[in-house]
Image (cartoon, rainbow, N blue to C red):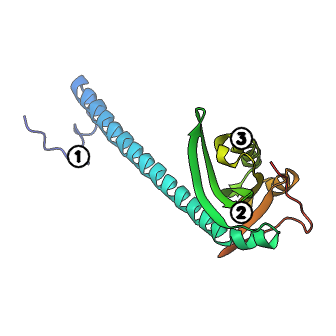
């Protein structure tokens, strides 16, 4: 028997009770539609997560390049004569993965900069802990003086003041460049 019903057509004439087969078929059709809808939701969620990852990584790269482009000038203004920049230093040492966003070097000193779109207190704490391990991660710099810096577009919960209190350069990306916003006379902490 061929079923010529459309979605709008009732399965039985109005005012007549449904039999078990008709109710069962309605449940099956409803279940099938729910499964299709669930599949579409999952696909939409996957696409949103993919776009979020892409946006976040591209946004982070933009902030890194803003900071990297001005870092030599900014540090020279603060008395650190930078000879070069090492972007995105990654590695694994003693079973620990590490990554430093931007490193400015000058022969016996370096400034390691953590770059965040939004700087949060936890980011400052995590970077502080990671900075203490920098000489273990990069033993070729074990005799160097290491300073830390955090760069960001926005800061949550006074994390910028927290970073300064921990001895970090505080670098705010502004427009097409960046600037160090520590108070005049600020002396960075050596690690």
User: Which mark is on residue 106?
Assistant: 2
Q: Position of residue 155 (x, y in %)?
A: 75, 58
Task: Kindly identify the residue that appears in the image at 67 percent across and 74 percent down.
Answer: 177
Disc 1 to disc 2, how far (Cα)? 79 Å
Please rate how many residues cluster around mark 3, counting C-alpha atoms within 10 Å: few if below 14, some from 14 to 19, many from 20: some
Task: Kindly identify the residue that appears in the image at 57 percent across and 48 percent down.
Answer: 90
Which residue bears the numbered disc 3? 133
* Dot in front, 1 or 2: 2
Please rate how many residues cluster around mark 1, counting C-alpha atoms within 10 Å: few if below 14, some from 14 to 19, many from 20: few
Please rate how many residues cluster around mark 2, counting C-alpha atoms within 10 Å: few if below 14, some from 14 to 19, many from 20: some
Q: Position of residue 137 (x, y in %)?
A: 65, 42
Quarter of the image with the N terminus in it: top left
Q: Quadrant of residue 171?
A: bottom right
Looking at the rendered structure, the secondary structure element under dot 2 is loop
Disc 2 to disc 3, how far (Cα)? 20 Å
* Dot in front, 3 or 1: 3
> In the rendered structure, which disc, 3 or 1, sits on the residue that comes first in sequence?
1
- Asked whether residue 17 is in view, the answer is no
Single out the residue that lies furthest toward the bottom: 176
Single out the residue that lies furthest toward the left: 1
- Asked whether residue 93 is in view, the answer is yes
Q: Nearer the viewer, residue 80 or 50?
A: 80
> In the rendered structure, which disc, 1 or 2, sits on the residue that comes first in sequence?
1
Looking at the rendered structure, the secondary structure element under dot 1 is loop
Q: Position of residue 182 (x, y in %)?
A: 85, 64
Which residue bears the numbered disc 1? 9
Q: Nearer the viewer, residue 103 or 162?
A: 103
């Amino acid at each position: 028997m061929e079923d010529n019903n459309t979605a709008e057509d009732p399965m039985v004439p109005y005012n007549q009770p449904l039999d078990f087969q008709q109710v069962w078929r309605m449940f099956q059709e409803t279940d099938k539609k729910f499964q299709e809808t669930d599949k579409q939701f999952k696909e939409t969620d996957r696409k949103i997560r993919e776009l979020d990852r892409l946006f976040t990584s591209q946004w982070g790269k933009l902030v890194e390049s803003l900071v990297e482009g001005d870092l030599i000038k900014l540090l020279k203004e603060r008395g650190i004569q930078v000879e070069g920049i090492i972007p995105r230093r990654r590695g694994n040492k003693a079973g620990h993965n590490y990554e430093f966003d931007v490193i400015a070097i000058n022969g016996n000193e370096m400034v390691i900069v953590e770059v965040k779109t939004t700087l949060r207190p936890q980011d400052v704490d995590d970077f502080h802990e990671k900075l203490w391990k920098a000489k273990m991660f990069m033993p070729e710099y074990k005799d160097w003086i290491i300073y830390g810096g955090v760069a960001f577009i926005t800061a949550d919960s006074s994390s910028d003041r927290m970073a300064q209190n921990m001895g970090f350069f505080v670098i705010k990306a502004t427009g097409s460049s960046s600037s160090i916003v520590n108070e005049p006379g600020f002396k960075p902490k050596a690690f």
